[in-house]
Amino acid sequence: MGSAQDGVGGQMVEQPLLQAGAVSAALGPIVVFIAGLFHGGGDDPADLAATLPHYAANGRWEAVHIGQFLGFALMLGGLVSLFRSLEGGRGAAAARLGFATALVAIATYAANQAVDGVAIKFVAGEWLRAPAAEKGAALRVAGAVRHVEIGLSAFAELTLGMALLLAGLAIAVDRVYPRWLGWAAVATGVGWATLGLLVAHDGFTQAGLTMLVGALLALWMLALAVSLWRRSTAATARDRAAQTR
């Protein structure tokens, strides 16, 4: 049967869970990157009047945001697999909290993408089509929708950062995975939580930090994918050795 005995926590970890998590963690950053290539939207997302025409003109806008959500969900799937694999060990408390936080993060991001991928494009079109006398009112409506998006983005980033911090803590306490993976999760989580706080306060003005933490997350997810897969293959080898005895 595809399960492995965890030497630290004494829990049974299913190999398909580890393998699925590894594949999800590896594919997630790739999907997000590809979707981002078609995003567009101007150079300054804080300048709403300059970006709205880009949103309205992008015929792939909804598909892009579905792709971004899928990539984010895949990455969170890898994180959930990690948490589930640690639930029976010494890091169980942090793993369970991290699991719940990851679910909150993906739910918040789904709401964010609904606003960014559907609502903001609608108000962008309405603003462009509005008569000159109504342009100001239409822009204020678009600004209100934009601030809903800002709030959801901030909380999605903040909860993702918290989930990564809990992942780092669980890894450090349990020691099933390399400790450097845990410290890297903590550093990446601090970056994402900081970004969430700054976005909540200042809006979309953190382009440099956004790119940095996005790159850190992608690299950490690839490292997680390797770690999950190695643990799965090691478990397979132990199972085979046990069957030959």
Image (spheres, rainbow, N blue to C red):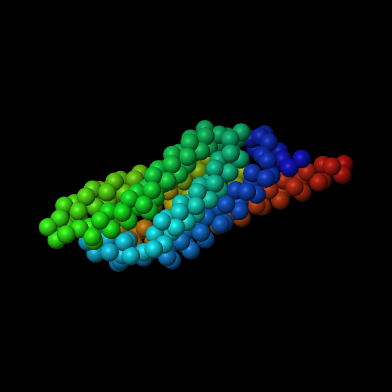
161 left or right, relative to 10: left
Counting every numbered tag in the picture gives 0
The image position of residue 214, as x and y in percent, is: 43, 58
- Residue 243 is drawn in which quadrant? top right
Give residue 14's position: percent from left, percent from top: 68, 41
Q: Residue at x 65, y 38 (%)?
A: 8
Q: Examine the rendering and report whether any part of residue 101 can be seen.
A: yes
Name the residue at 27% across, 61% down.
52
Image coordinates of residue 216 in percent, x first then y, are: 45, 58
Above/below status of 31 relative to 162: below
Which residue is farthest right?
245
Lateral position of residue 98 relative to residue 229, left or right: left
Residue 67 position, x and y percent, is 47, 56
State the quadrant of the C terminus.
top right
Q: Is residue 233 left or right of residue 214?
A: right
Residue at position x 12%, y 57% in the image: 133
Question: Farthest residue in the left direction?
Answer: 133
- Residue in the foreground of this view, choosing between 51 and 76: 51
Q: Nearer the viewer, residue 35 or 80?
A: 35
Does 154 sit left or right of 29 as displayed? Answer: left
- Which quadrant does the N terminus fall into? top right
Residue 179 visible to the viewer: no
At x 50%, y 49%, the residue is 73
